[in-house]
Image (tube, helix red, strand yellow):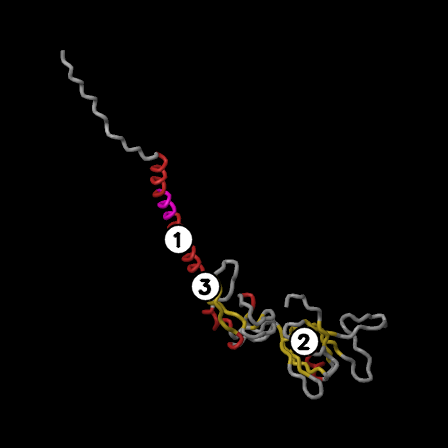
Amino acid sequence: MDTTTPAPPPIAPPRQPDLPISAGAKKSSRAPRRVIQALVWTLAALVGALVAISQVNRAGDRVEVLAVAHDVQAGQVVKASDVTTAQVAEDPALSPVPAADRSRIVGQRAAVDLRQGSLLTGSSVQSGGGLGDDLQVVGVEVKKGTAPRDELRPGDKVLAVVLPEQGAQSTTGTGAAKNGAEQEPESIEATVKSVGRTDATGSLVVNLAVPTTDGPQLAEKAAAKRIALVRQPRDGKR
């Protein structure tokens, strides 16, 4: 009888524990997240650069135009010293005069009062005398108290009222009544072309533009110093 004791079965070496699945998942998700953040930052930088370039380009779309350097009253001639240049953003809603047209503007007359710092437009000036080619100009010397003081300016509408001769009653005018009632003074409608300086006696010369039918009559009354001026209401545009 065999009494040999059988050998015990071999014992397997201890197995190392597996790494937790959650730990591996955390390591694998960090890399994509950092990549996404880097892409976002890159895109933000590109957008900012594009916006800056666009603003620079818009600021560069500027044009050189004419502006008013000094106040110019309506009817006065625009001199070279009255005009300057300015840089403005190009805008289709605006119609300023290009700086290249400076020579065309100088020598024309202001159609409205031009204020310092404002932009010149095509309607700001007009060629010629600004009073029409069918008018005559008469110089009228008005005595102190027969014209508004410091109120007349080129372009104003006035009434040249004919004063009666000393010791005589007022003459019959266009609006005079024919029945012997009190008569309106004779008057002539005119437009102020220019205003002279007041002299030591308070008199001044005002150049008036009138129709050719009234020019000789106004000149005759002005020579006799029988004219007083009444300024008509302004239309509020100047």
Q: Mark 3, mark 1: which one is toward the viewer?
A: 1
Which residues fall within the magenta stretch? Answer: 32-39
Distance from disc 2 to disc 3, alpha carbons, whole Å, reads: 40 Å
Specify which label sits upstream in the sequence, 3 or 1: 1
Q: Earlier in the sequence, mark 1 or mark 2?
A: 1
User: Element type at marker 2?
Assistant: loop
Residue that carries the numbered disc 3 in the rendered image: 62
* Disc with the residue nearer the chain's start (2 vs 3): 3
Say which residue label 2 marks: 152
Identify the residue shown where x is 65% and y is 83%. Answer: 197
Q: CA distance from mark 1 to mark 2?
A: 64 Å
| Residue 45, label in figure | 1
Q: Is residue 230 left or right of residue 64?
A: right
11 sits left or right of 50 in the view: left
Question: Circle 3: is it few (<14), some (14-19), or many (20+) Cα within 10 Å?
Answer: some
- Please tell me whether mark 1 sits on a helix, a strand or a loop: helix
- Do residues under tags 1 and 2 come within 8 Å of each other at their CB atoms? no
